[in-house]
Image: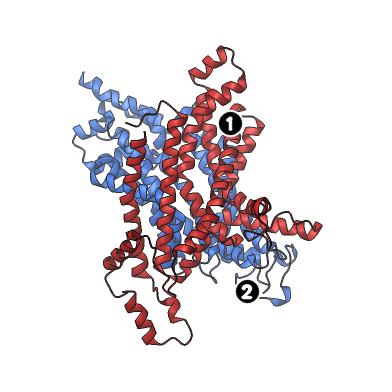
């Protein structure tokens, strides 16, 4: 089990290397990393040439890439092109904020989807089932940025009409968030709208999978046996049926973790949150390859870790699974 | 005995043909079934079977009320959007400051209201829908072509093409697709609808390639494929005349999925300012235009937004109807 998971993790290392190389190539060939410096006032050609030389921008792409890898091996993501400031502290700050958002969204989406999926499977073709199905279709068709905008409009309109400020529509914390518990509550309060916008697509997609796999399990022999021996319906659902039906949904959730992280690019930009997504989008506008590379590497590592956790969870949920 | 052996694979095939009925529509008479050495089998029988599959599909699809309603709605939208030059009451960039900031009204045909410059939003949404639909159509067409071709070759020949394809799919799991899209659009898009469409097509073909590969992997072991090979059919003929018609179902369903997601992704890119650039109207551009004043001039965000959601929703419903109608396990309904 553990060896299988480790083997899969090792396999992803060459993929990460390939991904970073391709990205580096694309960015270096097509972008102008000095674009921002050129636009600075009072900049002379000599200064530009100095930066160009000190950063080795005239070297072949492969040499530049190897230099980047060398930096990584020494535990450094390098510095920004425009100023000699290290990238890592910034990433560290935004990564923490984003992980709060993404993990909360993933957990809420998963729990809600499991609930909806189980309920619609148990009452197949009921009004509840049709309603959830229709809502999940709307969830598929609603671009997350638009959902976020609509939420913002709704919250502000309620504020204008009634004077009640239900949720903040931007930022991660209030001006004076306090410490300890009050900080936590303040943070959750700020994260609710972004979380909802981020989770809507996942809820729609996971609940479809959960419904399908639950239907399959409910009609299987062992569930019929459980019912025949007189177990209460609740026990059958939670202890017998759900446990197996969770496995495919968990796979989907684990594989979609990257999509969710990618979704933060849009959501954090709309809500103005200081996280990985907004960071990526800001750096994208600057055409500076190094922060973008750092972002991709970190995100890839996070996704690999989450796939690893999912692999380990299967073994726990389904003892039939033996990976060798 | 040989007669018997020849007969079996075809009889075995006829129920499977329901995956491929739009294909057999394009090749009347179930060309894939009757071609060549089908002398022993009365060709009428097969023809009737093929047609009844088509009828079966039609009946099931027409019964799917949401899908039918969506299809009618989408057709209306497509016709209206591509005739925007004729239908729209105003040009999309026609400025009329005297009528600025009008909420939606029937007066002067400002159904969706006007913006700060007095531009008519109904016209802008019509033209924007045209751009968005055009981009999505190109994406669906090209990504389907690439995905089918790569998936067919990978599933049929396996080998290195297969490994490369699978590694690419692995890559997509580890790197968020939207980040790759944003990178590509920011560096190569230059705000041009055609370029955006090509970028999306080049990045959205992998799921279909995997699906087609899977179907081809199982089809290549079927008796009728072996029979075709034994009777001397070339690889191209087997792949595209025999196996492809049996893959059309999943391909068509996937095409609707790509169409819907292409519309959403293009809108997202345009909203973030790296998709279609203004002044070209696209739904995402319009939403972004309205965003700065969305609290007071709400219609500037809501109207193009609702149009976008309705289009994506109707495409998804059509896809669902197609999937149900094509699903052989739902025979009894």
Q: Is residue A37 above or below residue A174?
A: below
User: How many residues crowd around disc 1 within 10 Å: few (fewer than 14), some, or many (20 or more)?
Assistant: many
Q: Find residue A22 and report its horizontal and vertical position in percent.
A: 33, 60
From this viewpoint, is residue B322 visible? yes
| Residue A135 location (% of width, % of height) | 62, 42
- Residue sticking out furthest to the front: A180
Left or right: B312 with respect to B2? right
Q: Residue at x 39, y 73 (%)?
A: A33
**Left or right: A104, with A74 as reference point:** right
Which tint is chain A?
Answer: red
Whether residue B229 is situated above or below residue A202 in the rendered picture: above
Q: Would you place residue B111 above or below residue A115 in this image? A: below
Looking at the picture, the colour scheme in use is: by chain
Q: Please tell me which residue lies in front, A261 or B81.
A: A261
Residue A324 horizontal/vertical position (percent): 32, 31
A257, B332: nearer the viewer? A257
Q: Which residue is mark 1?
A: A118
């Amino acid at each position: 089990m553990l060896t299988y998971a480790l083997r899969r993790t090792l396999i992803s290392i060459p993929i990460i290397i390939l991904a970073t190389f391709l990205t580096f190539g694309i960015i270096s060939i097509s972008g102008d990393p000095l674009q921002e410096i050129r636009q600075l006032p009072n900049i002379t050609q000599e200064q530009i040439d100095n930066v160009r030389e000190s950063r080795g921008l005239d070297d072949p792409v492969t040499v530049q890439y190897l230099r980047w890898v060398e930096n990584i091996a020494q535990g450094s993501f390098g510095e920004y092109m425009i100023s000699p400031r290290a990238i890592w502290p910034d990433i560290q700050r935004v990564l923490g904020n984003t992980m709060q958002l993404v993990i909360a969204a993933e957990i809420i989406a998963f729990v809600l989807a499991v609930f909806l999926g189980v309920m619609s499977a148990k009452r197949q073709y009921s009004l509840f089932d049709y309603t959830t199905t229709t809502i999940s279709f709307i969830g598929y068709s609603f671009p997350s940025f638009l959902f976020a905008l609509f939420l913002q409009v709704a919250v502000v309109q309620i504020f204008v009409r009634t004077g009640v400020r239900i949720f903040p529509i931007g930022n991660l914390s209030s001006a004076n968030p306090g410490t300890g518990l009050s900080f936590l509550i303040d943070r959750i309060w700020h994260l609710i709208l972004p979380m909802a916008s981020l989770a809507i697509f996942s809820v729609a997609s996971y609940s479809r999978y959960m419904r399908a796999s639950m239907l399959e399990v409910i009609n299987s022999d062992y569930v019929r046996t459980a019912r025949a021996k007189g177990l209460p319906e609740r026990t059958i659902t939670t202890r017998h049926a759900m446990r197996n039906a969770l496995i495919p949904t968990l796979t989907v959730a684990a594989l979609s973790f990257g999509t969710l992280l990618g979704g933060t690019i849009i959501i954090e930009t709309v809500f103005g949150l200081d996280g990985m997504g907004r960071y990526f989008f800001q750096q994208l506008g600057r055409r500076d390859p190094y922060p973008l590379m750092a972002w991709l590497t970190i995100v890839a590592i996070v996704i690999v870790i989450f796939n690893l956790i999912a692999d380990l969870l299967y073994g726990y949920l389904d003892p039939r699974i033996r990976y060798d | 005995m040989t007669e018997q052996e020849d007969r079996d694979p075809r009889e075995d095939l006829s129920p499977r043909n329901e995956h491929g009925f739009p294909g057999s529509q394009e090749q009347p008479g179930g060309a894939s079934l009757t071609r060549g050495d089908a002398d022993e089998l009365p060709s009428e029988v097969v023809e009737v079977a093929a047609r009844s599959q088509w009828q079966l599909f039609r009946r099931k699809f027409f019964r799917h009320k949401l899908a039918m309603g969506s299809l009618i709605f989408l057709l209306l939208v497509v016709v209206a959007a591509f005739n925007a030059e004729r239908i729209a009451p105003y040009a999309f960039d026609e400025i009329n400051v005297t009528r600025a900031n009008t909420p939606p009204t029937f007066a002067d045909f400002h159904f969706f209201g006007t913006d700060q410059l007095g531009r008519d939003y109904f016209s802008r949404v019509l033209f924007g829908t045209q751009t968005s639909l055009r981009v999505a159509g190109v994406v669906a067409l090209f990504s389907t072509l690439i995905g089918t071709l790569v998936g067919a070759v990978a599933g049929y020949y396996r080998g290195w093409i297969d490994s490369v394809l699978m590694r690419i799919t692995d890559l997509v799991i580890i790197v968020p697709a939207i980040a790759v899209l944003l990178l590509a659009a920011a560096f190569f898009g230059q705000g041009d609808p055609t370029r955006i469409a090509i970028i999306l097509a080049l990045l959205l073909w992998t799921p279909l390639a995997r699906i087609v590969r899977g179907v081809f992997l199982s089809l290549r072991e079927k008796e009728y494929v072996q029979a075709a090979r034994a009777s001397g059919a070339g690889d191209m003929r087997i792949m595209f005349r025999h196996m492809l018609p049996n893959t059309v179902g999943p391909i068509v369903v996937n095409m609707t999925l790509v169409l819907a997601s292409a519309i959403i992704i293009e809108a997202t890119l345009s909203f973030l300012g790296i998709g279609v650039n203004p002044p070209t109207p696209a739904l995402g551009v319009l939403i972004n235009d309205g965003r700065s004043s969305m609290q007071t001039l709400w219609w500037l965000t809501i109207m193009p937004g609702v149009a976008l959601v309705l289009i994506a929703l109707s495409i998804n419903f059509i896809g669902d109807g197609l999937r149900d109608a094509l699903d052989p396990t739902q025979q009894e309904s």
